[in-house]
Amino acid sequence: MVERHPLLNATTLVLLVLGLVAALGPIYLAVCSASVTSHQILVHGLALIPGDRLWENLGAVLHRADIGRMLLNSCAVSLIVVAGKLALASTSAFASVYFHSRIRHVVFWCTFATLLLPLEVRVVPTYAVASDLLSPLRTIVEWLTGLRLNLSINLLDSYAGLSLPLMASATGTFLFRQFFLTIPDELAEAARMDGAGPWRFFVDILLPLSKANFAALGTIVFLATWKDYMWPLVATSRPEMQTIALGTATFLPTETGQPPEWNLVMAAALLALAPPLVVIGLTQRWFVRGVTGVGK
Amino acid sequence: MTGPAIQVRGLSKRFGSRTVIDRLDIDFAAGQFTVVLGSSGCGKSTLLRAIAGLETVDEGTVSIGGNDMTRVPPQSRGCAMVFQNYALYPHMTVRENIGYALKLQGLARHERMRRIDEAAELLGLAEMLDRKPAQLSGGQRQRVAIGRAIARRQRVLLFDEPLSNLDAKLRHDMRVELRRLHDEIGATTIFVTHDQVEAMTLADQVVLLNQGRVEQADTPATLYHRPRNLFTAGFVGTPPMNLLDATHEGDRLSVEGGGEVRLDRRTANATPVVLGIRPEAVLLHATTGMDATVEAQEDLGSHRVIYARLGKQRLLVTEHGPRTLRPGQTVRVGLPPQAISLFEKASGERIGHATGDVPA
């Protein structure tokens, strides 16, 4: 329903402008503050007017830390998580919608219940598992046979360790499930009559129909992984495995008495912001369709 | 090449505690157009889906061309199906929709294109092969769905209420076209519908289903003129057959609230019966017969339906030609014995097969 009324139009416009200011304001402040000296910020607070030291500050950031390596790490981890999550979410939703097993509702709601246990809640056990992946296996073997195996896999400080714990999540499964439920059953039946097995149906029919959902979920997951701070902080100790979210924080003072260099923090944040902007720019059209559900 | 015969034996299907199909036995003759007719919820779609293999059955067998197909997966049964809502793949063009099954079969590209073009030619789709379903009208989508079925050259075609989403004019055109297609292809066709006009016009044989059981399986003409029971008599025909309470004694049939008709069959004792007669078989302005009072009439252009009253019973008569009656008028109506169907009052079953001949 579209209402047309002068007062309504004016109100909407004001709301839109306020929203825009709220969204762009901080970025403007960051750009301005990244272009002044540290001294200026300490004296006057965050800069409201752009200065002339943007390139110097960016150069200092690139010189001080291995930003390139961190951006690469972040890109790699985010892309791995996106690929893994999309694959897991779409196939698990496919299973829960199209395979009429007696336990499928149980499985689905168990999956859904994992929403109650985000990484922040289970960070200690997740760390324990990531640092010693085979410990449950060893325990079982020892309990069954009395043998003490000398096997261990440590996922800390690796891409696998950074990405695997973030991959499985119920939100993606739920998103795909809700979309698959809107596809008429006859489509699956027509495909069966045409001789398509479940896998063919998934690849030839479901995947093309859910392109927009893939784009939307992929974008959301990419951004969430990109800005995730807690897990990389826990799971990495070597500087060359750090992500950009951690890298930005290295410009904050670690010792009392050391003056904070806010201009460099802001410059690093700007560098960290660039890749997600590119991703959003590329997927924006599909993203909107996927979120509003008009992608079919 | 005609399609195979299909036999359904002792077929039952239950959803929970509800029995949708109850020990059905039906023969679908080879290469014939069979319409399964029934009101919604009578199990006709379930029957079709059981034949297609999309629905598992609780008891009984489905055999196609003499082979037991009860446990065979749908794609191996040699059936193609047209769904009520068309079920076209929205992201594929018309060409891809029709060709998808052929591609899965592993046919070479030029053979695929040949068959797609052939089906498109047959259905007048040649102009729209590169369009997507969303760019087509309802009738065109219906054609694509049919094209998808016939391009596979399966010998059995299954239709699940395919015309119910079309408007009246288009439905009529598609009916004519479907019958022509069938005569051209010769596949064994099973067509499920609740529309008796579709049943009467399309079918070689009509199977009338009611609550999961077969009420009658016959040619449309037999179904119309010699209904086997009161259900069929009341279901088939618009306006429906007149069903009048009467008593049969000796060779006389006395209609409650009306007069007598002399039949050529006799009973020893007086038996309560139901007299069935089609509205168009009733004679108006008869010299002998019974008096009826005209209550109302509907003018349909080509003919009028007259709502008359015989005592407490309603009698429908169709009148062709010039209008002769006004509401409130009394008219003498004749019930020709050869047009009368008699049913047992208690069981609703037809009595005798001598009466109610099917006109040649």
Image (cartoon, coloured by chain):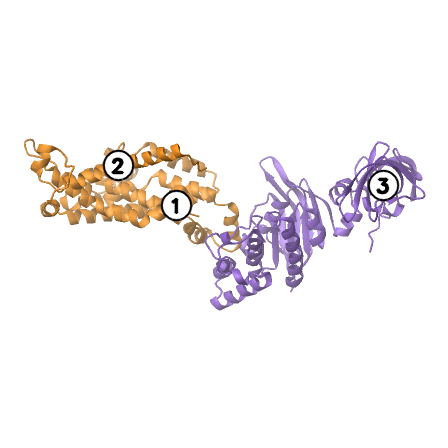
**Pair 1/3: label in front:** 3
Q: Residue farthest to the left? A: A257
Q: Which mark is residue B325?
A: 3
Q: Which residue is mark 2?
A: A21
Depth check: give the residue in front, A76 or A161: A76
Rendering coords of residue A261 (x, y %): 10, 38
Can you tell which chain is drawn purple? B
- Residue at (79%, 47%) from the top-left corner? B303
For residue A174, side relative to residue B15 (left or right): left
Front-most of residues A285 and A40: A40
**Screen quadrant of the C terminus of chain B:** bottom right
Does residue A237 appear in this view? Answer: no
Q: Quadrant of residue A90?
A: top left
Cα distance, mark 1 to mark 2?
25 Å
- Residue at (10, 33) in percent of width and height: A44
Front label number (1 vs 2)? 2
Residues under numbered marks 2 and 3 in contact, where contact means CB atoms less than 8 Å apart: no
Residue type marked 1: Arg
| Structural crowding at the residue carrying mark 3, measured as other residues with C-alpha within 10 Å and reported as few (<14), some (14–19) or many (≥20) | some
Whether pointer 1 and pointer 2 mark residues with C-beta atoms closer than 8 Å, the reply is no
The residue where tag 1 is placed is A289
Looking at the image, residue B59 sits to the left or right of residue A99; the answer is: right
Which corner quadrant of the image does residue A144 belong to?
A: top left
Badge 1 local density, few (<14 within 10 Å), some, or many (20+)? some
Give the x, y percent position of residue A125. 25, 34
